[in-house]
Image: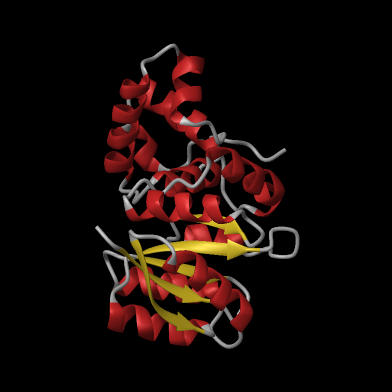
Amino acid sequence: MTIRILIADDEALLRMAFSTVLEAQPDMEPVGEAEDGAQAVRLARELRPDVVLMDVRMPGTDGIEATRQVIGSCAQTRVLILTTFDLDEYAFAGLKAGASGFLLKNTRPEELLTAIRHVAAGDAVVSPRITRRLLEKFRPHIPGGSAGCDERLSRLSAREHEVLVQVGAGLSNSEIAATLHLAEATVKSHLGRILQKLELRDRIQAVVFAYESRLIHPA
């Protein structure tokens, strides 16, 4: 299957660099480029790409709002947020808006390609360790009420609750398996049921849910 990719970034040189890397892959095809969020939304609706590489800081409609609109109108399209990390305080908002993950702009080409393939396959996980670092940076800014305030938590079994806590802490399936003394396949099954019961799209949204429901407490 060829992964069709839309590149949204206000810097022409970065769009060119991403496009060059993608064109060299036999299973990827850059289908369009957008220089701002509004154009990204329009092209996503027109081209229906599998993945959008979405910059956060763009003129006019920023990447956060563009992500929200793309996810809301293009059911099969996944969004991968691009961030400079140290300067960009909107990455968490992008994940909450429906992005399937995020990348640092200085990521190595092979990591970019691996991330795109994971997201296109529906895994929605770029790297639990990178996700953990992002949440460590932004957790003081994450809103939420008292622990366990979301009524959806009552739908989970005790074991699913334990797994969700570990997911929220940024652990991978293999790390959760080792921590809870489970088979990795069992962890994956638990995670699938968690997403279904909590009406969440993917693992990233599960991390966001864990923080907003205060299962994971800000330091």
Q: Which residue of the protein is positioned furthest toward the left in this rendering?
A: 1
Q: Is residue 147 left or right of residue 206?
A: right
Quadrant where the N terminus lies? bottom left
Q: Nearer the viewer, residue 34 or 74?
A: 34
**As drawn, 31 above or below 218:** below
Q: Which residue of the protein is positioned furthest toward the top in this rendering?
A: 181
**As drawn, 1 above or below 180:** below
Give the number of callouts: 0
**As drawn, 143 above or below 163:** below
Q: Is residue 181 left or right of residue 35?
A: left
Residue at the image position 50 percent from the left and 48 percent from the top: 208
Q: Nearer the viewer, residue 163 or 121?
A: 121
Q: Is residue 141 visible?
A: yes
Percent x, y for residue 32? 40, 80
Q: Quadrant of residue 164?
A: top left
Residue at the image position 44 percent from the left and 64 percent from the top: 24
Percent x, y for residue 159? 37, 20
Quadrant where the C terminus lies? top right
Percent x, y for residue 85? 69, 58
**As drawn, 147 above or below 80:** above
Q: Which residue of the protein is positioned furthest toward the right in this rendering?
A: 86
Residue at the image position 44 percent from the left and 11 percent from the top: 181
Percent x, y for residue 112? 52, 55
The figure's colour scheme reads: secondary structure
Residue at the image position 47 percent from the left and 74 percent from the top: 7
Q: Is residue 11 visible?
A: no
